[in-house]
Amino acid sequence: MSVRVRFAPSPTGPLHIGGVRTALYNYLFARKMGGKMLLRIEDTDQNRFVPGAEEYILEALNWIGIKIDEGQGVGGPDVPYRQSERKEIYRQYSEQLIQEGKAYYAFDTAEELEEMRKRLEDAKVDNISYNAVTRMQMKNSLTLSKEEVASRIASGEPYVIRLKVPLKEEIRFKDIIREWVVVHSSTIDDKILLKSDGMPTYHLANIVDDHLMGITHVIRGEEWLPSAPLHILLYRAFGWQAPEFAHLPLLLKPEGNGKLSKRDGLLGNFPVFPLQWTDPFSGEVARGFREDGYFPEAMVNFLAFLGWNPGTEQEIFSMDELIESFSLEKIHKAGARFMIDKAKWFNQHYLKEKTEEELVQLIQLPTGASADIAPKLVRLMRDRVIFPQEIVNEVPFIFESPAVYDEDIVKSKWNDDARKAIGIIKEAIQGISDEQFQAQFIHDTIFPALEAAAIKPGKVMQAFRLAITGLGKGPDLMLTLEILGKQEVIARIEKALVTLA
């Protein structure tokens, strides 16, 4: 049987980075096994639907490099792939369960359900739920006559359809990651399958769709593990073969204590969404990894290692290499700490791998700056930065003469010897033509001039850097001078000699 997996997010807001990891693992497994990956939009909860969320999901998957074979935005044999457009399919299957005695109509109002809960609480019952015991005290098609049930439905009285969970049944299944899971049916309540608005719940819709779409492996987050026994019961009720399950470990806070949240990103100054998201209701903007300057290759590498390990020392993988190495059996059970510094490490690696031309296209110079300096800026900064925009942002002194000078360097390095040396440097620079004003030639002119005056260059270079940039440290000074140009360098030397006299 050909492997078929699915990624089935809900359009209730921006796709969390944990969802992207789930999609990536599905994609890697499908490609490794020569199978297909489907994208299904689970939008049955219309109260939580957020405009733009579906488009965001598609764009995020495309950015990260996950190619969908069938599904929303692509098409395929099982259209439609939005669950809200498949209502009639779910109704047919829920009615099938009713006719087979495996589900039932329930007419209980919200007040009646609350009254039941209170009654059970007062009786100090451990398992407070609508189940095999309590169902017989409620208003449903198991306690009402067929005539009354038909009359209530015909009159338009609201109802839900609930699964008739067996009272004494052991539910066993083997999870690829977590081994055997065993649950007794007495711990599971009679879950609603079809809501009063005609929409299915997640439980019914995802079982029906996974079956009809031929899903062979359900790879999803650990938070769905408690629902898996119920899903096994549904497969049994329909007489269908259940897919294999693999429940992925949680993404944890950097400290390791609890699930990663948006608040953790705010506290740690990092995004938790793949792309920037503007809330359509509040206008609030949430950061995205793409807009923060992360490369998709870096994110793929980073996310792959959050819960999986190849069992070797290799850390840098192309997508094809990940596909070749990936297996569900190598996924850990324990949660994975979200260490943003590792994401930065991957990003820095891929930045260094970019060509000069690629990086030039990724940076934006300040208004008025000559485009000719972009390649030189890339050479100056590429080994010192993590994100492309830092190539410009980390060197404001390239675009503006320093207004202040590092006080510690002024106190420790700016003295009579430094002023004398910088005067000599100025004279040497004035003798260089504009055509010759390049890093190596500048170096080969300045250093001999200082040595001829019995001045060791190493003693005064920090003071010289201070005069040019206002700082005591920074990127290659000779290339910085070349980028600034001869006239600007002379002007800055003269300004420093006056300002720091």
Image: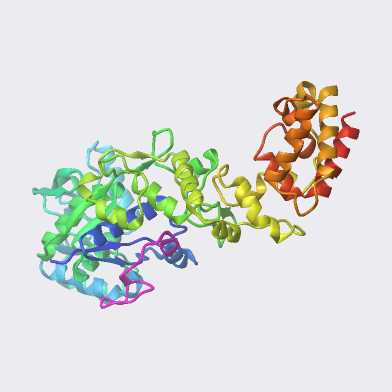
Q: Is residue 451 left or right of residue 179?
A: right
At a point 34% along the width and 56% down the height, the residue shown is: 319
> For the stretch drawn in magenta, what is the main secondary structure?
loop
At a point 36% along the width and 72% down the height, the residue shown is: 72
Q: Position of residue 171 (x, y in %)?
A: 11, 49
Q: Nearer the viewer, residue 4 or 102?
A: 4
**Quadrant occupied by the C terminus:** top right
Question: Would you say residue 72 sits in the magenta stretch?
Answer: yes
Residue 441, visible in the rendered structure: yes
Q: Quadrant of residue 54?
A: bottom left
Q: Nearer the viewer, residue 396 or 370?
A: 370
At a point 66% along the width and 44% down the height, the residue shown is: 394
At a point 59% along the width and 61% down the height, the residue shown is: 361
Q: Position of residue 103 (x, y in %)?
A: 17, 63
Q: Coloured how?
A: rainbow
Q: Position of residue 275 (x, y in %)?
A: 50, 57
Q: Is residue 167 left or right of residue 42?
A: left
Residue extending farthest to the front is 452
Question: Would you say residue 163 sits in the magenta stretch?
Answer: no
Q: Nearer the viewer, residue 341 or 357?
A: 357
- Indicate whether 420 appears above or below 288: above
Q: How many marks?
A: 0
- Indicate whether 464 appears above or below 249: above
Q: Quadrant of residue 320?
A: bottom left
Q: Which residues are magenta?
A: 60-81
Q: Quadrant of residue 310?
A: top left
Q: Position of residue 35 (x, y in %)?
A: 22, 65
Residue 141, visible in the rendered structure: no
**Quadrant occupied by the N terminus:** bottom left
